[in-house]
Amino acid sequence: MRLSAVQNDRVAGVLVGTAAGDALGAGYEFTKPAADAVIDMIGGGTFNWAPGEWTDDTAMTIAVARALAGGADVETREGFDAVAAEFLRWYDTQPKDIGNQTRAVLAHRPSTANEMVWHAKQLGNAKQGNGSLMRTSAIALDYLDDARGCSDAAAAVSRLTHPAPEAVDACRIWSSAIRYAVLHGSFDGVRKAAAHTSDPGYWLRLLDQAENGRPEDFSNNGWVVHALQTAWWAITTADASSPRHLQDALELCVRAGSDTDTTAATAGGLLGARWGASAVPARWRRIMHGYPGMDANDLVRVAMRIAFDGGADERGWPLADTIDYAGFSTDRLAVHPHDEGVILSGAAHYDRAAVDAVISLCRVGAKPIAAEHIQFWLVDSGKDRNANIEFVLDDAARTINELRREGKRVLVHCVEGKSRTPAVAARYAKLLGRDPRDVLRVMPWARPNPALWNAATR
Ligand SMILES: [Mg+2]
Protein backbone atom coordinates (compact mmCIF):
# COMPACT_ATOMS: atom_id res chain seq x y z
CA MET A 1 0.00 0.00 0.00
CA ARG A 2 1.23 3.47 -0.87
CA LEU A 3 2.04 5.49 2.26
CA SER A 4 2.63 9.22 2.68
CA ALA A 5 5.83 10.62 4.20
CA VAL A 6 4.00 11.21 7.48
CA GLN A 7 2.58 7.69 7.48
CA ASN A 8 6.09 6.30 6.90
CA ASP A 9 7.26 8.17 9.99
CA ARG A 10 4.41 6.57 11.93
CA VAL A 11 5.27 3.11 10.58
CA ALA A 12 8.79 3.58 11.91
CA GLY A 13 7.36 4.84 15.19
CA VAL A 14 5.64 1.55 15.98
CA LEU A 15 8.80 -0.37 16.81
CA VAL A 16 10.86 2.60 18.01
CA GLY A 17 8.00 3.62 20.33
CA THR A 18 7.60 0.10 21.70
CA ALA A 19 11.33 -0.15 22.41
CA ALA A 20 11.54 3.36 23.89
CA GLY A 21 8.79 2.61 26.40
CA ASP A 22 10.34 -0.73 27.24
CA ALA A 23 13.84 0.67 27.74
CA LEU A 24 12.46 3.56 29.79
CA GLY A 25 10.45 1.25 32.07
CA ALA A 26 13.14 -1.43 32.38
CA GLY A 27 14.94 0.30 35.24
CA TYR A 28 11.76 0.66 37.31
CA GLU A 29 10.15 -2.76 36.88
CA PHE A 30 8.23 -3.96 39.96
CA THR A 31 8.71 -0.63 41.72
CA LYS A 32 6.66 2.49 42.28
CA PRO A 33 8.92 5.50 41.66
CA ALA A 34 8.73 8.26 44.25
CA ALA A 35 6.74 11.31 43.17
CA ASP A 36 9.89 13.44 42.90
CA ALA A 37 11.99 10.79 41.11
CA VAL A 38 13.35 11.80 37.71
CA ILE A 39 12.26 9.21 35.13
CA ASP A 40 14.88 8.49 32.49
CA MET A 41 16.46 5.66 30.53
CA ILE A 42 18.74 4.74 33.40
CA GLY A 43 18.85 0.96 33.12
CA GLY A 44 19.38 -1.11 36.26
CA GLY A 45 16.26 -2.63 37.76
CA THR A 46 15.61 -6.29 38.60
CA PHE A 47 17.69 -7.60 35.73
CA ASN A 48 20.43 -4.95 35.81
CA TRP A 49 19.78 -3.62 32.31
CA ALA A 50 22.26 -1.31 30.61
CA PRO A 51 20.91 2.24 30.11
CA GLY A 52 18.80 2.13 26.93
CA GLU A 53 18.64 -1.65 26.81
CA TRP A 54 15.25 -3.11 25.94
CA THR A 55 13.81 -6.23 27.54
CA ASP A 56 11.79 -9.27 26.51
CA ASP A 57 8.84 -7.08 25.48
CA THR A 58 10.76 -5.61 22.55
CA ALA A 59 12.75 -8.80 21.93
CA MET A 60 9.52 -10.73 21.35
CA THR A 61 8.08 -7.88 19.29
CA ILE A 62 11.21 -8.08 17.13
CA ALA A 63 10.76 -11.85 16.86
CA VAL A 64 7.30 -11.24 15.38
CA ALA A 65 8.66 -8.40 13.23
CA ARG A 66 11.51 -10.48 11.81
CA ALA A 67 9.11 -13.20 10.74
CA LEU A 68 6.83 -10.63 9.09
CA ALA A 69 9.75 -8.81 7.47
CA GLY A 70 10.85 -12.17 6.07
CA GLY A 71 7.51 -12.43 4.30
CA ALA A 72 5.67 -14.66 6.77
CA ASP A 73 1.89 -14.60 6.42
CA VAL A 74 0.43 -15.45 9.84
CA GLU A 75 -2.73 -16.88 8.28
CA THR A 76 -0.79 -19.62 6.53
CA ARG A 77 0.64 -22.61 8.38
CA GLU A 78 4.12 -21.79 7.12
CA GLY A 79 3.92 -18.15 8.19
CA PHE A 80 2.52 -19.01 11.62
CA ASP A 81 5.36 -21.51 12.08
CA ALA A 82 7.85 -18.79 11.18
CA VAL A 83 6.62 -16.62 14.08
CA ALA A 84 6.80 -19.58 16.48
CA ALA A 85 10.32 -20.36 15.25
CA GLU A 86 11.41 -16.77 15.94
CA PHE A 87 10.10 -17.09 19.52
CA LEU A 88 12.24 -20.20 19.99
CA ARG A 89 15.23 -18.54 18.38
CA TRP A 90 14.97 -15.80 21.00
CA TYR A 91 14.28 -18.32 23.81
CA ASP A 92 17.45 -20.20 22.88
CA THR A 93 19.55 -17.10 23.63
CA GLN A 94 18.55 -17.71 27.28
CA PRO A 95 17.07 -14.26 27.88
CA LYS A 96 17.34 -13.03 31.45
CA ASP A 97 13.80 -11.65 31.46
CA ILE A 98 10.99 -13.93 30.32
CA GLY A 99 7.37 -14.11 31.47
CA ASN A 100 6.27 -17.19 33.41
CA GLN A 101 3.56 -18.20 30.98
CA THR A 102 5.82 -17.70 27.96
CA ARG A 103 8.58 -19.72 29.60
CA ALA A 104 6.18 -22.53 30.49
CA VAL A 105 5.18 -22.82 26.82
CA LEU A 106 8.56 -22.30 25.16
CA ALA A 107 10.32 -24.71 27.57
CA HIS A 108 8.64 -27.55 25.61
CA ARG A 109 10.46 -26.29 22.51
CA PRO A 110 7.39 -26.86 20.34
CA SER A 111 8.45 -27.48 16.75
CA THR A 112 5.38 -25.92 15.11
CA ALA A 113 3.01 -23.06 15.83
CA ASN A 114 0.10 -25.46 16.37
CA GLU A 115 2.15 -27.40 18.89
CA MET A 116 2.93 -24.12 20.66
CA VAL A 117 -0.75 -23.21 20.73
CA TRP A 118 -1.53 -26.66 22.15
CA HIS A 119 0.98 -26.29 24.99
CA ALA A 120 -0.35 -22.82 25.77
CA LYS A 121 -3.89 -24.20 25.99
CA GLN A 122 -2.83 -26.87 28.49
CA LEU A 123 -1.90 -24.11 30.93
CA GLY A 124 -5.54 -23.01 31.08
CA ASN A 125 -7.06 -19.56 30.96
CA ALA A 126 -6.50 -18.60 34.59
CA LYS A 127 -3.31 -16.62 34.13
CA GLN A 128 -4.21 -13.86 31.65
CA GLY A 129 -0.75 -12.30 31.83
CA ASN A 130 0.27 -9.31 29.72
CA GLY A 131 2.92 -11.30 27.81
CA SER A 132 1.15 -11.28 24.46
CA LEU A 133 -0.10 -7.68 24.63
CA MET A 134 3.44 -6.41 25.11
CA ARG A 135 4.58 -7.87 21.76
CA THR A 136 1.54 -7.17 19.59
CA SER A 137 2.53 -3.87 17.97
CA ALA A 138 4.44 -5.22 14.95
CA ILE A 139 1.40 -7.14 13.62
CA ALA A 140 -0.25 -3.89 12.54
CA LEU A 141 2.58 -3.13 10.11
CA ASP A 142 1.78 -6.18 8.01
CA TYR A 143 -1.95 -5.44 7.78
CA LEU A 144 -2.20 -1.74 7.05
CA ASP A 145 -4.60 -2.52 4.19
CA ASP A 146 -6.63 -5.15 6.05
CA ALA A 147 -8.39 -4.34 9.33
CA ARG A 148 -9.93 -7.78 9.77
CA GLY A 149 -6.66 -9.54 8.99
CA CYS A 150 -4.85 -7.36 11.52
CA SER A 151 -7.23 -8.29 14.32
CA ASP A 152 -7.16 -12.00 13.46
CA ALA A 153 -3.38 -12.15 13.17
CA ALA A 154 -3.01 -10.40 16.54
CA ALA A 155 -5.36 -12.99 18.05
CA ALA A 156 -3.46 -15.89 16.49
CA VAL A 157 -0.06 -14.66 17.71
CA SER A 158 -1.48 -14.12 21.21
CA ARG A 159 -2.69 -17.74 21.27
CA LEU A 160 0.87 -19.00 20.73
CA THR A 161 1.41 -18.40 24.43
CA HIS A 162 -1.64 -16.55 25.82
CA PRO A 163 -4.98 -18.08 24.76
CA ALA A 164 -7.19 -16.49 27.46
CA PRO A 165 -10.01 -14.48 25.84
CA GLU A 166 -8.96 -11.32 27.68
CA ALA A 167 -5.41 -11.58 26.31
CA VAL A 168 -6.62 -12.36 22.80
CA ASP A 169 -9.11 -9.47 22.79
CA ALA A 170 -6.54 -7.06 24.24
CA CYS A 171 -4.18 -7.92 21.37
CA ARG A 172 -6.95 -7.49 18.83
CA ILE A 173 -7.77 -4.04 20.23
CA TRP A 174 -4.21 -2.83 20.52
CA SER A 175 -2.91 -4.03 17.14
CA SER A 176 -6.03 -2.65 15.47
CA ALA A 177 -5.59 0.69 17.23
CA ILE A 178 -1.94 0.85 16.14
CA ARG A 179 -2.94 0.12 12.56
CA TYR A 180 -5.53 2.90 12.76
CA ALA A 181 -3.05 5.35 14.27
CA VAL A 182 -0.48 4.71 11.51
CA LEU A 183 -3.10 5.36 8.86
CA HIS A 184 -5.01 8.24 10.45
CA GLY A 185 -2.75 9.75 13.12
CA SER A 186 -5.27 9.45 15.93
CA PHE A 187 -6.08 7.28 18.93
CA ASP A 188 -9.69 6.74 17.86
CA GLY A 189 -8.91 3.19 16.81
CA VAL A 190 -8.85 2.00 20.41
CA ARG A 191 -12.58 2.49 20.98
CA LYS A 192 -13.44 1.45 17.44
CA ALA A 193 -11.60 -1.84 17.95
CA ALA A 194 -13.10 -2.40 21.42
CA ALA A 195 -16.54 -2.06 19.86
CA HIS A 196 -15.68 -4.94 17.53
CA THR A 197 -14.66 -7.47 20.19
CA SER A 198 -16.89 -10.33 21.33
CA ASP A 199 -17.83 -8.31 24.45
CA PRO A 200 -17.84 -4.59 23.54
CA GLY A 201 -19.61 -3.55 26.77
CA TYR A 202 -16.89 -5.10 28.90
CA TRP A 203 -14.04 -3.41 27.05
CA LEU A 204 -15.69 -0.02 26.64
CA ARG A 205 -16.37 0.06 30.39
CA LEU A 206 -12.70 -0.76 31.04
CA LEU A 207 -11.62 2.08 28.73
CA ASP A 208 -14.00 4.49 30.53
CA GLN A 209 -12.53 3.42 33.83
CA ALA A 210 -8.99 3.99 32.52
CA GLU A 211 -9.84 7.46 31.22
CA ASN A 212 -11.51 8.55 34.43
CA GLY A 213 -9.55 6.57 37.00
CA ARG A 214 -6.19 6.57 38.71
CA PRO A 215 -3.36 4.00 38.42
CA GLU A 216 -4.43 2.54 41.78
CA ASP A 217 -7.68 1.43 40.12
CA PHE A 218 -5.77 -0.89 37.77
CA SER A 219 -2.54 -1.51 39.64
CA ASN A 220 -2.32 -5.26 39.00
CA ASN A 221 -0.85 -4.52 35.61
CA GLY A 222 0.88 -7.86 35.19
CA TRP A 223 -2.70 -8.83 34.30
CA VAL A 224 -3.37 -8.07 30.66
CA VAL A 225 -6.52 -6.06 31.40
CA HIS A 226 -4.82 -3.75 33.90
CA ALA A 227 -1.78 -3.43 31.62
CA LEU A 228 -3.98 -2.18 28.78
CA GLN A 229 -5.83 0.13 31.17
CA THR A 230 -2.59 1.59 32.54
CA ALA A 231 -1.32 2.27 29.02
CA TRP A 232 -4.64 3.86 28.03
CA TRP A 233 -4.79 5.89 31.23
CA ALA A 234 -1.32 7.30 30.52
CA ILE A 235 -2.13 8.11 26.89
CA THR A 236 -5.42 9.83 27.73
CA THR A 237 -4.03 11.64 30.80
CA ALA A 238 -0.86 13.22 29.38
CA ASP A 239 -1.17 16.49 27.43
CA ALA A 240 -1.66 15.37 23.83
CA SER A 241 -1.27 18.78 22.17
CA SER A 242 2.30 18.22 20.93
CA PRO A 243 4.69 15.35 20.13
CA ARG A 244 5.99 15.72 23.69
CA HIS A 245 2.90 13.65 24.46
CA LEU A 246 4.87 10.51 23.60
CA GLN A 247 7.52 11.14 26.26
CA ASP A 248 5.03 12.37 28.86
CA ALA A 249 2.69 9.40 28.49
CA LEU A 250 5.56 6.92 28.70
CA GLU A 251 6.74 8.65 31.86
CA LEU A 252 3.24 8.32 33.34
CA CYS A 253 3.31 4.57 32.64
CA VAL A 254 6.52 4.31 34.63
CA ARG A 255 5.14 6.46 37.45
CA ALA A 256 2.12 4.15 37.67
CA GLY A 257 4.55 1.45 38.83
CA SER A 258 4.61 -2.37 38.81
CA ASP A 259 5.23 -3.87 35.36
CA THR A 260 6.58 -0.58 34.07
CA ASP A 261 8.52 -1.88 31.06
CA THR A 262 5.45 -3.67 29.74
CA THR A 263 2.91 -0.90 30.29
CA ALA A 264 5.31 1.60 28.71
CA ALA A 265 6.19 -0.75 25.83
CA THR A 266 2.48 -1.26 25.20
CA ALA A 267 1.73 2.46 25.30
CA GLY A 268 4.86 3.15 23.26
CA GLY A 269 3.70 1.07 20.31
CA LEU A 270 0.53 3.11 20.01
CA LEU A 271 2.19 6.44 20.82
CA GLY A 272 4.85 5.82 18.18
CA ALA A 273 2.15 4.88 15.67
CA ARG A 274 0.32 8.13 16.41
CA TRP A 275 3.27 10.56 16.62
CA GLY A 276 5.93 8.85 14.52
CA ALA A 277 9.51 7.80 15.17
CA SER A 278 10.39 11.49 14.84
CA ALA A 279 8.71 12.10 18.22
CA VAL A 280 11.13 9.77 20.02
CA PRO A 281 13.95 12.06 21.17
CA ALA A 282 17.50 11.36 20.02
CA ARG A 283 18.56 11.43 23.67
CA TRP A 284 16.78 8.06 23.96
CA ARG A 285 17.39 6.73 20.47
CA ARG A 286 21.16 7.17 20.85
CA ILE A 287 21.33 4.61 23.64
CA MET A 288 18.47 2.22 22.80
CA HIS A 289 19.66 -1.30 21.99
CA GLY A 290 18.96 -4.95 22.62
CA TYR A 291 18.11 -8.33 21.15
CA PRO A 292 19.28 -9.33 18.56
CA GLY A 293 22.10 -6.76 18.52
CA MET A 294 19.92 -3.98 17.14
CA ASP A 295 19.68 -0.25 17.74
CA ALA A 296 17.01 2.36 17.04
CA ASN A 297 18.12 2.78 13.39
CA ASP A 298 17.69 -0.97 12.86
CA LEU A 299 14.15 -0.87 14.27
CA VAL A 300 13.19 1.77 11.71
CA ARG A 301 14.46 -0.41 8.88
CA VAL A 302 12.68 -3.55 10.10
CA ALA A 303 9.38 -1.68 10.45
CA MET A 304 9.73 -0.21 6.96
CA ARG A 305 10.53 -3.61 5.48
CA ILE A 306 7.25 -5.01 6.83
CA ALA A 307 5.16 -2.07 5.67
CA PHE A 308 6.87 -1.93 2.25
CA ASP A 309 6.24 -5.66 1.90
CA GLY A 310 9.79 -6.37 0.80
CA GLY A 311 9.81 -3.42 -1.61
CA ALA A 312 11.94 -0.31 -1.53
CA ASP A 313 11.85 3.28 -2.68
CA GLU A 314 13.40 4.35 -6.00
CA ARG A 315 16.89 4.42 -4.47
CA GLY A 316 16.72 1.11 -2.65
CA TRP A 317 15.86 2.32 0.85
CA PRO A 318 15.34 0.64 3.34
CA LEU A 319 16.97 -2.51 1.93
CA ALA A 320 20.16 -1.26 0.24
CA ASP A 321 23.51 -1.18 2.02
CA THR A 322 24.29 2.15 0.41
CA ILE A 323 21.86 4.59 -1.15
CA ASP A 324 22.74 5.76 -4.64
CA TYR A 325 22.52 9.54 -4.82
CA ALA A 326 24.05 9.67 -8.32
CA GLY A 327 23.01 12.83 -10.14
CA PHE A 328 22.96 14.93 -6.95
CA SER A 329 25.66 17.34 -5.81
CA THR A 330 26.57 15.40 -2.69
CA ASP A 331 30.17 16.59 -2.34
CA ARG A 332 29.63 19.96 -0.66
CA LEU A 333 31.37 20.65 2.60
CA ALA A 334 31.44 23.57 5.03
CA VAL A 335 32.33 24.33 8.63
CA HIS A 336 29.65 25.72 10.93
CA PRO A 337 30.15 29.50 11.24
CA HIS A 338 29.90 29.39 15.03
CA ASP A 339 31.47 26.02 15.87
CA GLU A 340 34.47 24.61 14.02
CA GLY A 341 33.75 21.16 15.47
CA VAL A 342 30.59 20.88 13.37
CA ILE A 343 30.97 19.95 9.68
CA LEU A 344 28.06 20.55 7.30
CA SER A 345 27.92 18.50 4.13
CA GLY A 346 26.18 16.48 1.45
CA ALA A 347 25.82 12.72 1.51
CA ALA A 348 29.22 11.94 -0.09
CA HIS A 349 31.02 12.50 3.22
CA TYR A 350 28.85 10.80 5.80
CA ASP A 351 30.60 7.42 5.87
CA ARG A 352 34.16 8.62 5.40
CA ALA A 353 34.67 11.87 7.32
CA ALA A 354 37.03 11.77 10.30
CA VAL A 355 34.42 12.66 12.93
CA ASP A 356 33.07 11.05 16.10
CA ALA A 357 29.40 11.35 15.29
CA VAL A 358 27.30 11.68 12.16
CA ILE A 359 23.84 13.20 12.04
CA SER A 360 21.91 12.02 8.98
CA LEU A 361 18.93 14.09 7.90
CA CYS A 362 18.17 12.01 4.78
CA ARG A 363 17.75 8.34 3.97
CA VAL A 364 21.01 6.41 4.21
CA GLY A 365 22.03 2.80 3.62
CA ALA A 366 21.98 -0.05 6.11
CA LYS A 367 25.77 -0.45 6.16
CA PRO A 368 27.15 0.58 9.57
CA ILE A 369 29.63 3.46 9.71
CA ALA A 370 32.61 3.91 12.01
CA ALA A 371 31.20 6.95 13.86
CA GLU A 372 28.20 7.13 16.17
CA HIS A 373 25.25 7.48 13.81
CA ILE A 374 22.10 9.39 14.72
CA GLN A 375 19.36 9.60 12.12
CA PHE A 376 16.57 12.15 12.05
CA TRP A 377 13.28 11.93 10.23
CA LEU A 378 13.19 15.17 8.26
CA VAL A 379 11.72 15.62 4.79
CA ASP A 380 12.81 18.50 2.55
CA SER A 381 9.38 20.04 2.78
CA GLY A 382 7.00 21.82 5.12
CA LYS A 383 4.52 20.65 7.73
CA ASP A 384 2.53 18.64 5.22
CA ARG A 385 5.31 16.07 5.07
CA ASN A 386 6.95 16.66 8.49
CA ALA A 387 4.46 15.94 11.25
CA ASN A 388 6.80 17.17 13.98
CA ILE A 389 8.84 19.80 12.16
CA GLU A 390 9.75 22.06 15.12
CA PHE A 391 10.30 19.14 17.44
CA VAL A 392 12.72 17.45 15.03
CA LEU A 393 14.70 20.62 14.21
CA ASP A 394 15.00 21.31 17.90
CA ASP A 395 15.92 17.72 18.74
CA ALA A 396 18.63 17.71 16.05
CA ALA A 397 20.12 21.02 17.23
CA ARG A 398 20.10 19.89 20.86
CA THR A 399 21.75 16.65 19.88
CA ILE A 400 24.59 18.50 18.13
CA ASN A 401 25.00 20.54 21.28
CA GLU A 402 25.04 17.44 23.47
CA LEU A 403 27.60 15.71 21.25
CA ARG A 404 29.83 18.80 21.34
CA ARG A 405 29.61 18.87 25.14
CA GLU A 406 30.82 15.28 25.04
CA GLY A 407 33.84 16.56 23.12
CA LYS A 408 32.82 14.95 19.85
CA ARG A 409 33.38 16.24 16.34
CA VAL A 410 30.12 16.11 14.44
CA LEU A 411 29.17 15.88 10.77
CA VAL A 412 25.66 16.95 9.82
CA HIS A 413 24.46 16.04 6.35
CA CYS A 414 21.54 15.51 4.01
CA VAL A 415 21.65 14.63 0.31
CA GLU A 416 23.08 17.88 -1.08
CA GLY A 417 23.61 19.97 2.04
CA LYS A 418 21.28 22.47 0.49
CA SER A 419 18.12 22.62 2.60
CA ARG A 420 17.83 20.33 5.61
CA THR A 421 21.46 20.71 6.69
CA PRO A 422 21.47 24.54 6.67
CA ALA A 423 18.11 24.51 8.48
CA VAL A 424 19.46 22.36 11.30
CA ALA A 425 22.71 24.34 11.33
CA ALA A 426 20.66 27.52 11.69
CA ARG A 427 18.70 26.04 14.57
CA TYR A 428 21.98 25.13 16.25
CA ALA A 429 23.24 28.69 15.74
CA LYS A 430 20.10 29.96 17.45
CA LEU A 431 20.64 27.55 20.31
CA LEU A 432 24.13 29.05 20.72
CA GLY A 433 22.59 32.52 20.77
CA ARG A 434 24.12 33.45 17.40
CA ASP A 435 22.72 34.73 14.11
CA PRO A 436 21.29 31.79 12.14
CA ARG A 437 21.72 33.68 8.85
CA ASP A 438 25.50 33.29 9.15
CA VAL A 439 24.97 29.69 8.04
CA LEU A 440 24.04 30.91 4.56
CA ARG A 441 27.33 32.77 4.33
CA VAL A 442 29.43 29.59 4.69
CA MET A 443 27.01 27.57 2.53
CA PRO A 444 26.51 29.83 -0.51
CA TRP A 445 24.85 26.94 -2.37
CA ALA A 446 22.13 26.67 0.28
CA ARG A 447 18.51 26.99 -0.89
CA PRO A 448 16.61 25.96 2.21
CA ASN A 449 12.97 25.08 1.89
CA PRO A 450 11.19 28.22 3.21
CA ALA A 451 8.96 26.31 5.63
CA LEU A 452 11.95 24.44 7.07
CA TRP A 453 14.02 27.61 7.31
CA ASN A 454 11.22 29.52 8.98
CA ALA A 455 10.62 26.74 11.49
CA ALA A 456 14.35 26.61 12.23
CA THR A 457 14.92 30.33 12.66
CA ARG A 458 11.66 31.41 14.26
MG1 LIG B 1 10.11 -6.98 30.18
Image (cartoon, grey):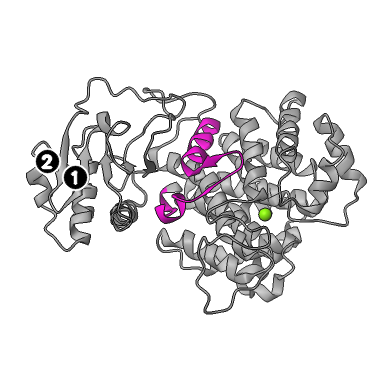
Question: Magenta span: helix, strand or loop, mainly?
Answer: helix
Could you tell whether 428 is left or right of 312 in the image?
Answer: left
Q: Position of residue 20 (x, y in %)?
A: 53, 53
Q: Identify which residue is drawn at 66% across, 27% down.
A: 72
Counting the numbered discs, the total is: 2
Q: Please give the name of the residue rendered at 37% of the width and 22% of the height, measured from the top-left corner.
A: 314
Q: Is 305 part of what is drawn in magenta?
A: yes
Q: Is residue 354 visible?
A: yes
- Quarter in which the C terminus is drawn: bottom left
**Image mark for residue 443:** 2
Q: Amino acid at mark 1?
A: Pro
Residue at (13%, 39%) from the top-left corner?
Answer: 446
Tell me if 2 is positioned left or right of 360 in this view: right
Q: Residues within 10 Å of mark 1 (few under 14, many from 20)?
A: many
Relative to the observer, which residue lies in front, 42 or 239? Answer: 42
Residue 458 appears in the figure: no
Which of the 4 quarters of the picture holds residue 316? Answer: top left
Q: Earlier in the sequence, mark 2 or mark 1?
A: 1
Q: Secondary structure at mark 1?
A: helix
Residues 79 and 411: in front is 411
* Residue 440 placement (x, y as % from top left): 10, 45
Compared across the picture, whether 452 is left or right of 26 comes to: left
Query: Which class describes the residues within 10 Å of circle 2: few (<14), some (14-19), or many (20+)?
Result: many
| Amino acid at circle 2 | Met
- Residue 422 marker: 1
Q: What range of the chain is rendered magenta?
A: 278-307
Name the foreground residue: 205 vs 232.
Answer: 232
- Residue ranking furthest to the top: 326
Location of residue 411 by image quarter? top left
Q: Is residue 234 above or below residue 347?
A: below
* Contact check, label 2 and label 1, Cβ < 8 Å: yes
| Residue located 66% across and 64% down the image | 29
